[in-house]
Image (cartoon, grey):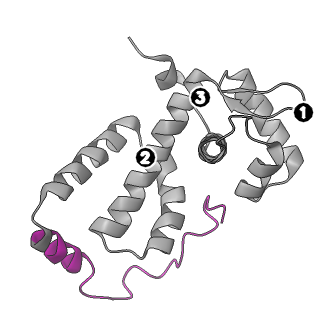
Amino acid sequence: MTRPEEQLQLSAAQQDYLEAVYALSLEDESGDGVRVTNIAAALCTRLPTVTRTLARLRAMGLVEQEERGPVFLSGLGQRLAAQLAHRHEDVVALLSDVLGVDPVTAESEACVMEHGLSGSSSERLHHFLEAWQRLDPQLRRALREAAGSEATDQFHLLGDASGSGDRA
């Protein structure tokens, strides 16, 4: 039997909103909820767009909000947002720790890549990273260096992926 969260189809933007509310709520020690203006600022988005997207997330049962009030994640929204945040962290770790991509680029590109991963691929990535951490540090260093040892222009024809879902 499928769990409810496996049946939801969220757009990349909706996933970003859940992640943003999650991150902002972790910063909010008071527990008073997340302000819409803070969501807009975090996502570099206009307030009307935030309001529309939150209405969709409310209809899906992922956020709770009284009119013009603060935003809270529902139980399901909390679970999904935690999974999304974890997926993001794993993609950043793959790019930076395994492949040696600089942290700023890894963070930006993870925002694009994470939305294309299935739950199964995310789980496999997570287990891979756990195994990676158990490897001898010298072996990890050698593998990381091999991944970026020969810089070529072979893969640079398209340039950066910014603009392909990156909100920064």
Q: Which residue is mark 3?
A: 77
SS under mark 3: helix
Of the numbered discs 3 and 2, the one sitting upstream in the chain is 3
Label 3 amino acid? Answer: Gly
Question: Is 48 displayed left or right of 82 in the figure?
Answer: right
| Percent x, y of residue 137 | 14, 69
Q: Which residue is mark 2?
A: 87
Mark drawn on residue 45 = none
| Percent x, y of residue 47 | 87, 48
In this view, the residue farthest toward the front is 30
The quarter of the picture where residue 41 lies is bottom right
Q: Bounds of the magenta span?
A: 139-168
Question: Is 41 displayed left or right of 122 in the figure?
Answer: right
Label 2 amino acid? Answer: Arg
Residue under the point 77% across and 35% down? 54
SS under mark 2: helix
Question: Is 55 displayed left or right of 21 in the figure?
Answer: right
